């Protein structure tokens, strides 16, 4: 009685991890497209491509982001949870308007968290290579109408951290956040209202 031997090809460990069953593959592709649409849509809202209150339709958004309506719908739900978008059934999507109260709350939160983080970083010190890399990043230039102030502010924060001066690091971070808040409030007050 002859035994039939079936040879099975062994996959290398890398090949095994690359294999996905068909249903899982399509879910991954869809998730990737949804993620791309979400990121692009969110970026455009934040950058002001869409005006607050502006109505948007799935059809237009699907065309803009080169996807179907499903990834747009999934993205819109996420953006609504983040309070960047308002979904009105049978009417479409509307870019949320940020109120002065919400803006103030954002800056209060930033002040609490970022000032404490700067103080902690200065207290604990850190890896000199990491601090040097952060100082390089602090040198990043910005295109603004206000003499490249963020670069100077970032350098001052990093210098206080490198010098291990917690009080100065906290104060420099506070000043930086207040400067940022003032700029945003000036921009917000200079935007003409849409009627």
Image (cartoon, rainbow, N blue to C red):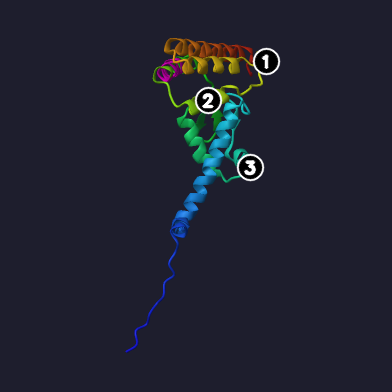
In the rendered image, is residue 70 in sight? no
Above/below status of 71 relative to 25: above
Which label lies toward us, 1 or 2?
Answer: 2
- The kind of secondary structure the magenta stretch mainly shows is helix
* Image disc number at residue 192: none
Nearest the camera: 193 or 117?
Answer: 117
Q: CA distance from mark 3 to mark 2?
A: 44 Å
SS at circle 1:
loop
Q: Residue farthest to the left? A: 1
Does the residue at mark 1 contact the one at mark 3 (Cβ under 8 Å)?
no
Nearest the camera: 119 or 124?
Answer: 124
Q: Residue farthest to the bottom? A: 1
Q: What residue is pinned by disc 3? A: 63
Q: What residue is pinned by disc 2? A: 132
Q: What residue is pinned by disc 1? A: 145
Mark 1 Cα-neighbour bin, 10 Å: few <14, some 14–19, many ≥20: few
- Location of the N terminus by quadrant is bottom left
């Amino acid at each position: 009685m002859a035994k039939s031997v079936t040879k099975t090809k062994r996959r290398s460990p890398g090949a095994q991890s690359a294999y996905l069953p068909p249903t899982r593959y399509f879910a991954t592709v869809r998730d990737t497209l949804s993620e791309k649409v979400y990121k692009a849509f969110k970026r455009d809202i934040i950058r002001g491509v869409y005006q607050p209150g502006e109505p948007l339709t799935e059809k237009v958004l699907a065309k803009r982001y080169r996807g179907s309506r499903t990834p747009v719908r999934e993205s819109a739900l996420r953006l609504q949870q983040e309070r960047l978008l308002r979904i009105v059934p049978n009417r479409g999507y509307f870019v949320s308007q940020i109120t002065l109260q919400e803006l103030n709350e954002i800056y209060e939160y930033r002040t609490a968290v970022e000032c404490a983080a700067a103080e902690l970083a200065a207290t604990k010190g850190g890896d000199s290579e990491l601090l040097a890399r952060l100082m390089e990043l602090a040198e990043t230039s910005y295109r603004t109408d206000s003499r490249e102030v963020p670069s100077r502010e970032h350098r001052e924060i990093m210098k206080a951290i490198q010098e291990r001066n917690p009080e100065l690091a906290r104060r420099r971070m506070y000043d930086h956040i207040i400067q940022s808040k003032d700029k945003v409030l000036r921009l917000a007050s200079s935007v003409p209202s849409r009627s």
